Structures are given as structure tokens and as C-alpha cells.
Image (cartoon, grey):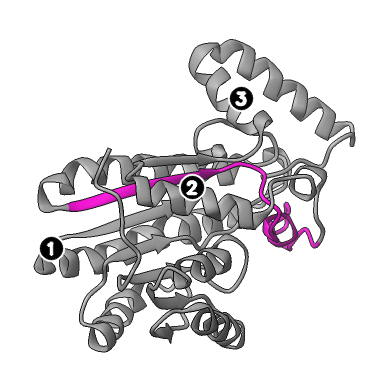
Amino acid sequence: MSEGFDFNGAVVWITGASSGIGEELARQVAARGAKLVLSARQQSELERVRDACLAAGSPDALVLPLDVADHAAMPAKTRAVVDHFGRIDLLVNNAGISQRSFCVDTDFSVYRQMMEINVLGQIALTQAVLPVMLEQGGGHIAVTASVAGKVGAPMRTGYCAAKHAVMGFFDALRTEVAADNIAVTTITPGFIRTNVARNALTADGTPLGRDDDDIAGGMAVEDCVREIVAGFEAGTPEIAVGGEMELGLLKLKRENPEQAFDLLAQMAADARAGARPGGR
């Protein structure tokens, strides 16, 4: 376990900050006195979040539009943050997109988007920020992965592949930068009430456009983020957050993988029969 993170006065850069976990994280750490960099694609939504963060107590909040699929933009965006604040204390790689389709039906372009956005975008930004943290003598890097980064869930072959890759990358990075006073945190949410299902890509690459039962019945995003913030403050390197079913599945995968596989196969059979559209 690493030393706990103190948000008061820290410069915290959050991607995917215009909605969901990213937006709520920005609000909650703003109340703890963090200075914020808010990134996503929609400037108007970022400005809305900025205003809320300033009202909540943030001393400063920079709106920095960013498409994480534009990997070449990362160095210039990083320089803009350093020019404004002088440093970066915590980078939260939170932007991402999910999937809802069976492999046999899925256009290959959907898999490409899963990797470009959920994996390569996180790596590109991390590589741009890492030299800044090395020069300033420390920092903290985090990524929002998923329970799907630990288990293989039906109708998410691309999403699971991407989140497993993210977990592997950041677990390996943790080992490389531990001696440089840089902490790495992985976050593995389960079913959280956000727009993740609505925005998930279907077989032809179009958004699902609706909630599914698991997400609709999931943990409130405010409660999820409270646990994430507490994990940062406690120095927890891997923060698992969600309901009993998701966290129980993580435990089952460790202790009885064959039973976990059987359970997930039954979920796939139910989804194919139209009994459950699935969740994150």
C-alpha cells in the first residue's frame, strides 16, 4: 500500500470529466480543495462541470477539451496543463467506452475503437505526463478499468480485452515507477449508474442508446466515487467498487475459476435468449 493521496491543493487531471464517474470525482475532490484539469470532448459540458467544481470549493479548474483517440495531441495538452499550473500531481485516466454485442456479430472496427480509446489513449496520455512527474520528483497516476478487466463477461469481448490490457499495463507501470516516488492506482468499478450502457457500442458501432438492467440497478455514482476517493486517501493500489454480485464474482474468479466460468456462460445464454441485455 502506498502513501495516501492528499487532494487539498493538488493538481488533479481527470479525463472523461464531463459525465459519470469522472464528473462526480471532479466534484468530490473539488470539495477537498483540489485544483482541477477537466478533459473530455464536449467543451460546453466541461464548462458546466467546471462551474460546479468552483462552487464546491476548487481554487482553480481548467477546461481542457481532449479526444483520447487523438494520441498525437497528448504532448501539447500536457504542456498546456504545466503552463497553467506548473505541475501535475494526479492523472486519472477515466475516459472510455463500453460494448454490447456478441463477437460473431461485431464489426472489427468496434474492436479497433475499444483499443484506441480504452487502451492506447490511456497509454499515450500517461507517456506524456510521466516525464513531468519524474522531473517534479513524484506524482500519482490512476486508471478507471472495470470488473471486466478481471473477468470475461458476455457481450463485451472487446471491452474486456481492452480493460484486461489496461490492468496489465498499469500494474506493470507501478513496478517501474515505484522507486521514482510515483504511485499507480487501478480502479475496478462494477455496475454503476452512469451513461456507460447508453453510450456502449453495438455490433455495427452505433451506441446502444438505452440503459440496461444491471446498470440501472447498480450503485449510485456518488457512492461509488466516495469509495474511490477514500481508496486514494488510504493509499489503496487497486480499488474495487460495486455491488455484492460484482465483488463476489471477483472473489469467485480467484477462488473457483471454473464455477465463475460456468456462471458467466449462463449469463451469455440468458443474453442470447433475450433474458438480460447485460451490464458493465
Along the line of sight, the residue nearer the viewer: 69 or 134:
134
Q: Which mark is residue 248?
A: 3
Along the line of sight, the residue nearer the viewer: 160 or 129:
129
Q: Quadrant of the C terminus?
A: top right
Spatial distance from mark 2 to mark 1, Cα to Cα?
A: 24 Å
Which of labels 1 and 3 is toward the front?
Answer: 3
Q: How many marks?
A: 3
Q: Could you tell me the amino acid type at mark 1?
A: Leu
Of the image marks 2 and 1, the number of the one nearer the N terminus: 1
Of the image marks 1 and 3, the number of the one nearer the N terminus: 1
Q: Which mark is residue 134?
A: 1
Identify the element where label 2 is drawn: loop
Residue 68 seen from this side: no
Q: Which residues are magenta?
A: 182-209
Q: Quadrant of residue 200?
A: bottom right
Q: Which mark is residue 145?
A: 2
Identify the element where label 1 is drawn: helix
Q: Could you tell me the amino acid type at mark 3?
A: Gly
Spatial distance from mark 1 to mark 3, Cα to Cα?
A: 38 Å
Q: Quick check: is 198 in the magenta stretch?
A: yes
Q: Quadrant of residue 133?
A: bottom left
Q: Residue at x 66, y 30 (%)?
A: 244
